[in-house]
Amino acid sequence: MKKLKFPTAQTILLIISGLVALLTWIVPSGKYDSLAYNKTENTFTKTHLNTTQTLEATQETLTDLNIKIPLKKFTGGDIWKPISIPNTYQKVDANPQGIVALIKSPVKGIIAAADIIFLVLIIGGLIGIMNYTSAFDAGISWLAKTLKGREFILIIIVTILVAAGGTTFGLAEETIAFYPILIPIFLAAKYDAIVALACIYIGTSIGTMCSTVNPFSVIIASDAAGINWTTGLAERFVMLFLGLIICLLYIIRYAQRVKKDPSKSIIFDQKEDIEQLFGNTTDSAIELTNRLRLILFIFAMCFVIMIIGVSQLDWWFIEMTSVFLVGAIVIGLIARIKEYAFVDTFVKGAGELLGVAIIIGIARGVTVLMDDGQISDTLLYYASNVTNGMHKGLFVNVMLYIYAGLSFFIPSSSGMAVLTMPIMSPLADGVGIGREMVVNTYQYGMGLFAFINPTGLILASLAIVKVGYDKWLKFVMPLVIILTLFTMLFLTITVYLP
């Protein structure tokens, strides 16, 4: 009998799309009224079903709507998305998503995710150009010789740097560019591709999970909860430090086991294929010339400029994509690649990541089905009712799981914040705890599930590394369980601190 294979990422997401479409036939449709700030006219726009109403942009208006958020959070641009208005949920006519809607959802998702898809394709083109110059091979060979015997330092450096990006400015989608670069380095250090994947993906996941100054999660969530984002900051720093130590110890323990005995690798059966795909350049004889050093410097500067732009200049996908496109052209000129060869190599490099781009689009299609079926607000409504009358210790832990569950349907951190915080944060008042605890459970719940969330970035990341979702689950689930238990303990202790 032929052994059954675990389905591909695309198939998994299509199955999930089908289940979500089925949910729209079972879960009642419902909507909260929403409120958006119009910066041009300095007014609020209240949306009730299909009707809109213009209101004065005053603190009194917010008070009348039972929204406990300072007006300056809207006028200052801290909250730029429509928020849900508490106590306005009502059922609406069902809009179940049938076969036609299911078929259209991946296409709609690809269109909706066009910005990140183009970023991925342009990065693929840049990686293709870099491979053409042999700069990676020379750099990897040099690094492998330099770190010989101390390769674990690489794990610590990469994980900490990526986590720093996650906690400060929400480094997530951008890490897709790191895999083709770092996997050959880890292979040269006698680790497997899982170690490279873990350093990058777990690093960014623990960083965003314990966001400290991330404007796309903790700041917008705190604003939507009506509190200062610095409230609860000390607890998040402690959580980040301890969580990062747990993750590093877990990754290093696995990495050392694989280095000592390659057969212990979870993906040992793919060892030859992955090494052939990414190259194992330990014995590379390519010299790291000054020209190749300059090419590597330009390549690194693309990421430095991207990070500065996102964190300081309000850049987003268009600007990031432009940086990588210009970087590819500059590198092509330095390497003296002929025009025809440049275009051909760039297109082939982009094609290598086309499968990843499609995965991102299909995942976004799941959200499209949710929105069109109008069941997101219904799930939020019932989730908010679950915690009625709970003791504060139980409350924070239940909220942790509620946010983990909701993140399957709403993987966007900023989207989750503006949708849920006006509804969820007032629940803390009734329990007798600070609203920052709801902000923390939102971050920790989303962050924990992000380690395995198929509607998030993990399937796209696995597609680059050519590792199956089942292999990833086998590797990461013990860590997820450890982190979950630790988080529950941490929340329980902090909620009782004076």
Image (cartoon, rainbow, N blue to C red):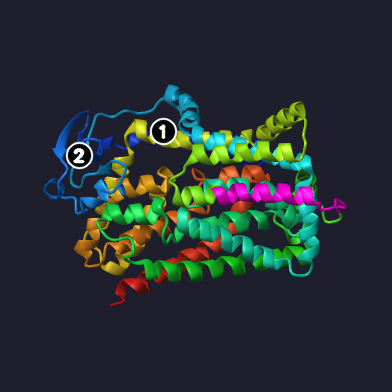
> What residue is rendered at 58% in x and 42% in y?
460
The question of residue 121 being in magenta is answered with no
288 with respect to 60 (left or right)? right
What span is in magenta?
A: 284-305
The residue at the far top in this view is: 100
Tag 2: residue type?
A: Phe
| Residue wearing tag 2 | 44
The residue singled out by tag 1 in the image is: 368
Up/down of 145 relative to 335, above or below: below
At which x and y percent is residue 216? 40, 50
Rendered view: 203 above or below 368:
below
Residue located at (46% from left, 27% from top): 108
| 30 vs 256, nearest the viewer | 256
Magenta region includes residue 304: yes
Write the residue at 76% across / 60% down.
Answer: 143
- x, y (%) of residue 175? 58, 49
Q: Residue at x 50, y 56 (%)?
A: 166
**Do the numbered discs 2 and 1 sit on residues whose CB atoms are within 8 Å?**
no
Location of residue 392 (image quadrant): bottom left
- The circle drawn on residue 388 is none
**In the image: residue 26, left or right of residue 484:** left
Query: Residue 322, how many percent across, how many down?
Result: 56, 37
Image: 319 above or below 438: above
The secondary element bearing badge 1 is classed as helix
Earlier along the polypeptide chain: callout 2 or callout 1? 2
The image quadrant that residue 495 belongs to is bottom left
Outermost residue toward the bottom? 498
In the shown orientation, is residue 276 left or right of residue 3? right
